[in-house]
Image: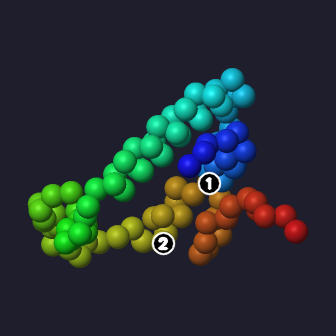
Amino acid sequence: MDVTDALVDKIAHLARLDFPRSEKASIKKDLERMIRFVEKLSELDTTGTPPLLHMSDVVNNLREDEVRGSVSRREALENAPDHDETFFLVPKVIKK
């Protein structure tokens, strides 16, 4: 796969990245190396090899859920900078 300046620009746009033009050559070279690596992996014969879902067989032991008390509405509103009797009041951020 050929890595062009247009491809680098498109990937940067999709990833919402902004970098100086002086770094484009370095980024292009890194991207070419990554693509060559993946192409090299595709040369391997994986027939009969099951897909790997996790990197190890270790199982994550989670603790049991415990029901605990929570903060009342009144207590939560005490620390709010602005509130009414029921809700937190916040500045409007979406303008019509």
* Left or right, residue 57 beside residue 96: left
Of the numbered discs in the image, which one, if any, rests on residue 73?
Answer: 2
Percent across and percent down for residue 63 are 15, 67
Residue at x 84%, y 64% (from the top left corner) = 95
The mark tally for this picture is 2
Percent across and percent down for residue 87 are 61, 72
Depth check: give the residue in front, 7 or 59: 7
Amino acid type of disc 2? Answer: Arg
Amino acid type of disc 1? Answer: Pro
Return the residue found at the far right.
96
Residue at x 48%, y 72% (from the top left corner) = 73
Q: Secondary structure at mark 1?
A: loop
Residue labelled with disc 1: 81
For the C terminus, which image quadrant? bottom right
Residue at x 60%, y 45% (from the top left corner) = 2
* Left or right, residue 61 beside residue 92: left
Of the numbered discs 1 and 2, the one sitting upstream in the chain is 2
Q: Is residue 5 above or below residue 78?
A: above
Give the alpha-carbon distance from disc 1 to disc 2, as whole Å. Answer: 14 Å
